[in-house]
Amino acid sequence: MAISKYIRNGSFALLLLSALLLLSWVYLSMPEANAQQQPEHVVLQPSGVIEVPPYGAMAWFPDSRRLAIASNGIRIVDTVDGTVSPPLTKQDGLRLFISPNGKYLAALLGIGFRLFATETWSELAAYNSQTGNCKAGYLRGLAFTADSSSIWLGCGNRGIQGAIKLSLPNLEVVDRLEVAPEWTPESDLSRRYFIHIQYPVPILHLVTTDYETPSTPGVLTPARKQVRAYDLESKRQLVDMTFERKEDWPSATSPSVYLSDDLSTYLVYNAYPLPSGVVSSFNAATKTKIAVFHPPLDQESAPSQTKLDVLLGRRLLFKDDKVIAWAIKLPSRDGAILGWNYKTGKLAQEIKLPYALSEIILSPDKTKIAVMKEFAPAEQRTIQIYTVRD
């Protein structure tokens, strides 16, 4: 009798355990549960080092295999077999941009750009921002349209505050968007504007800084900042936010605001919170803060002597809900590649490097990253390729 009761109780316990295991399996099979189980990081794995001549800029072709580099002219680097072509042009540029169809390369020169045909590498046209329709001292970014028929130029600093659209390959003005009053020597200095175009999508960002009435002549103190973002093709305003709190202010010394690929999240880099600065994420629609990313510091160094400069404006790379950026640690100038989830602010990966970086770029298919060293000796010039894995 006692034995049979024991068996019955044991069978019930076994049945209960089986049911719990089944429920656990069903729960873990649900997409929401799986999403929670996934690691919050993008894994960058070194996949090759290519020796190259001295160079200063690079850009991916649409095939995500070839790179164009500025090296006493434009050269082509095959990231699969490691070959480097001889110079294909006589001129290059400070930054390179390749159209989505791969037929055009624009070499940005600061005050203008040169346009090349990638089939023949002949120069098709040149644009000077000081004498052209921009009337600007320097171009504030550049982006091709999705169909590769036109190119948008960011105008600012002097002249037009906005962007103009040029047809390809003739560089005729076919559209424009002015987002602030045109600058003149008589312009009110209590309000200043900073413009840049986010690449590769043609989105225009405008950072407006309002200054307090100076108590000391010549000394301007920021009072508030406003950011706006526009889809250049549709002219639709995507973001309109005002920051009263200094800890939220975007830095104005370089591009410091970006929209995520899905246009849902606005990222703002503020360099002032020492020693490293922060990157804040905001919901673009509700304007609420989502998360704050604090770049890691080398704990062996005194905070007063170490600053990790994210240099967000050069390139901010998006993959799903992750961000990949590069940093330079001052004063040592060692480099680092940082990856974090912009929805949580959590660091996902840090790759420390014994040299400074001047640029990282993500391939169009988002499977590779090319890393460029800063001011490396000629015999040490390399391009490091990383594979991006989820």
Image (cartoon, rainbow, N blue to C red):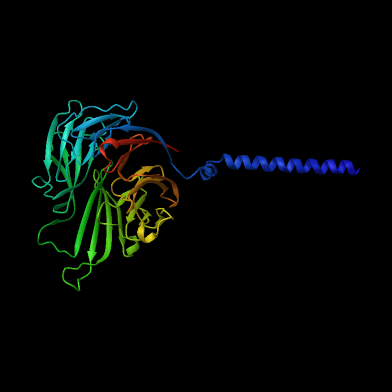
* Residue 74, quarter of picture: top left
Q: Is residue 340 left or right of residue 90?
A: right
Q: How many marks?
A: 0
Residue at x 33%, y 44% (from the top left corner)? 355
Of residue 260 and residue 136, the one placed in the foreground of this image is 136
Residue 149 appears in the picture as rendered: no
Of residue 297 and residue 206, the one placed in the foreground of this image is 297
* Residue 57, quarter of picture: top left
Q: Is residue 114 left or right of residue 233?
A: left
- Position of residue 25 relative to residue 307, above or below, is above
Residue at x 85%, y 43% (from the top left corner)? 6
- Position of residue 211 relative to residue 285, above or below, is below
Of residue 21 and residue 113, the one placed in the foreground of this image is 113
User: At which x and y percent is residue 258?
Assistant: 31, 49
- Position of residue 326 relative to residue 145, above or below, is below
**Quarter containing the N terminus:** top right
User: At which x and y percent is residue 317?
Assistant: 34, 43
Looking at the image, the residue that sits furthest to the bottom is 215
Of residue 120 and residue 68, the one placed in the foreground of this image is 68
- Position of residue 218 relative to residue 11, above or below, is below
* Residue 63, quarter of picture: top left
User: At which x and y percent is residue 215?
Assistant: 20, 74
